[in-house]
Structures are given as structure tokens and as C-alpha cells.
Amino acid sequence: MEDISSLNASFFRSESEVELKNAYPEVYGLIDSENEYEDTSIVPFLPLHRLNSISERQQCLEIISEVIETGLFTSGHFIGHIEDKLREFYDAQTCIATSSGTDALKIALKAVGVGIGDEVILPINSFAATENAVMAIGAIPVFANIDASYNMIPNEVERLSNVRTRAIIPVCLYGSTRNISEVFRKARQAEIPVIVDAAQCFGIKSIMNFCDILALSFNPFKNIGTFGKSGSLLTRSPEFAQISRQYSYHGFAEGKKNIKAQNWGLNSRMDNIQAATLSVKIKHFGVNSTKRCLLAARYHMLLKDLSCEIHLPIEQTENTWHLYPLFLRNLCRNQLISYAKKRNVELEIYYPVLSHCGDHELATSYPAKMQFRPSEDIHSSLVHIPLHNHMSFEEQNKVVEVLHDFFR
Ligand SMILES: Cc1ncc(COP(=O)(O)O)c(C=O)c1O
């Protein structure tokens, strides 16, 4: 598996679309061959029936049939195979394949010693799973501001940490690892463990250097997704590895059947059937990421003349392009979304409500909300445009055209 950073480093070097096309005709060919789906006039944000190509679907059907023949639906050899692959890729000591990214986070929190009433720092703008994992084990989420990279501001570690802080979960949101190394440096100084929520940034090796535990998600909507829920955690610490294994399966001691080493544990190992589909998807990951990174570089080239109206994503290299965010310089988000909809292009906002703004007790009773003004300003100007593994140039051209027409 290739590291995504090197793909971006190549594609983003080009100054123009012509240069990009001349330098990478074979990647253009791959994207041009995305014609195996019926044509619709709508450019969907993420077409669910195109999450997997025809060949991915065929190969997964075959491997699922293989698992069905064996009856090994839960445990089975594909799990160990996937764990080995991921461990090697990230140069980690241990990989534990889990039933979801959310459960990988819960297990990681238990492994680093977070307990009831402890505080965990995390960014204000993540998917609910990040704060939910903290709350599921009885700990208290402490929200940090973000900057224009959409990731947590490193200085928030000093501002928010205290004697009750037991962990920090920086999130590589939309696929970018920006700020994470600095968060890790500051956390190390404060002797606080770091669990990186890398659910959206699978494929960037260096991130393993900036955490105690890495949590991944392979749910179907991720850049590499299985045919149901699944995730993984990785660590270089033998101690965290041992406790994680125990919490991932009923608190049982490793290698001792039905003998508990912890008071309790989850039932959170990845199913063999999901591991089997992941073993197929991993083979396609290189090609899918190559296409995705080239499409992202192409967006950069075709939208840069709109710089008076929009800011493009800051992080170009350490980015898996899980989502492609635009920062609108003038508050015109709703108008843009409605205009694009009328022109049959779907735009979305991930995630629509910041953690302190919801209609539930955690949000309504969250103290000192004024502290999040900087994050609110960034968030209110944010919109995402379509980008996925099997997007065609025709679809991308339509998105670019609609954006130009709106700002004309
Ligand atoms: C940032 C983030 N964290 C955690 C998760 C949870 O992963 P899963 O859906 O596999 O539980 C997701 C994915 O949905 C995510 O995007």
C-alpha cells in the first residue's frame, strides 16, 4: 500500500490542469473509465450505489461466499490477515481489528486509563462518535477550538488541560493531519496520552508517530470501507496493546478462553466477514486513492481563480481527501447550497452542528460557550463539495462550473 502523502506531493506539484494531464495520463485514463454506472443528470454528494466499483463488488461477493461456506462469521483467519497488513503499513507493534471506529476509540480510552469523571480534550467539530466514545465510558468531553485547517488548535492543550485530563483525542478531520504533530508534542510535555481519531485519514503513515493509539474506521462511507461496520486500533505500546485486547473482547485475558482479566469488556472484534471484504478493498486502495488525490489536485487547479470568494483546503500533502471543504469568504452558504441544488449538484456540511450547539444536555449545559466564537466563525463559512473514489471528470466539471457560475 502506498503512502498517500507521496501521491499528493506528486499531483499538487503541477501548476495547471494541462501540466497535470500531461504528467499523469494513466491516472486520467483510470478516472475516464469510471463509466460503468448509468448516467444521471444529478451530481450526488456521495452516491451509495457507487461506493464500490463493479469489480470490487464481484470480488467481495466471492470472498463473502467463501466465508459463508466455512461458517466462520465472527472469528476467522481474515481478521489476523488484516491486522498483519495494517500493522506493517503503520509500522506498529499491534493492530486490533474492531467492530467499528467508535469501539476502537472506546477501547483506546480504556487502554490509556480513562475512567469515570476523567476529562478528555477533543475538537468541537468532530463526528458525534468522538465525543460519544468519551461519554460511553463515563468520561467528560472537553471541547477545543479549531483553526482554518478544521483541526484542533495545538495551544488548546495548554488552555484546557488540568489534573483531571486523562487523554486528548485530536481528529484528522476531512482527512487532513494538520496540527496533530504539534498537539502530540504539547501533550507529551504535559504527560497526557494521545489517541488520534484517524477515522477519516486512513493511508498516511506518519500519523502513527504522533499518537499512543491510532483509531481507524472502515465503515462503508470511508475512503476504504467494508460491507458493514468495522474499524481498527494500532499501537506501538505493548502495555496499551494488552489492555486493548482485553477490552475488545469481554475483558478476557489474551490466549485464555473465557477467563477475565478485567471487570468487563466489550464485544468489539471485527467480524471475519468484514475482514474478508476489507482484504479485497485493500487491494483496490492504491488505485482508489490515486484517483481521489488527483481529483483533489484538479479541484485545486480549477477553483484557484475563485480565491477572492473561497479558501481552498490548506493541507495539500498530508491529506486523504475524505471530504473536500470550501471556506466561503462571504456569508453566502445557504444561497450557494440552494443554487447548486437547482443546478443538480449536491453540497453538504460536515457536520452541521458543533458539539456545544445541539439540543441535548451535554450541549445545552456546556459552560462558557463564548470561548467557541472562533470555531463558530470558521464553521459558519464551511461547505463541502462532492469527491469520492468513483467520481467522473464529467461530474467534477459540473461542480466546478456551478461554483464559477454562482460567483460570477
Ligand atoms: C471522525 C470520526 N470519528 C469516528 C468515527 C466512527 O467510526 P465508525 O462509524 O466506524 O464507528 C467516524 C466515522 O463515522 C468519524 O468520521
Image: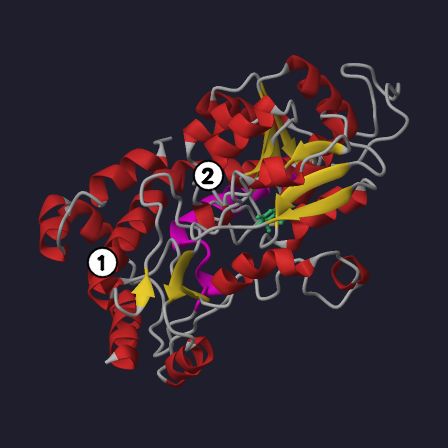
**In this orientation, does residue 71 appear?**
yes
Is 309 within the magenta?
no
Judge from the rendering whether residue 236 lies leftward or rightward of residue 53; answer left or right: right
- Residue 6 in percent (x, y) is at 29, 34
Nearest the eye: 239 or 181: 181
Kindly identify the amino acid type of the residue bearing the numbered disc 2. Asn
Q: Is residue 395 left or right of residue 104?
A: left
Residue 32: mark in rendering: 1
Residue drawn at 61 percent across, 53 percent down: 124
Q: Amino acid at mark 1?
A: Asp
Task: Give the class, few, some or many, for how many residues have Cα within 10 Å of label 2's Cα (few <14, many ≥20).
Answer: many
Which quadrant holds residue 40?
Answer: bottom left
Q: Residue at x 76, y 16 (%)?
A: 254
Magenta segment, prevailing SS (helix, strand or loop)? helix
Residue under pointer 2: 179
The residue segment tinted magenta is 45-70
- Asked if the magenta segment contains residue 47, the reply would be yes
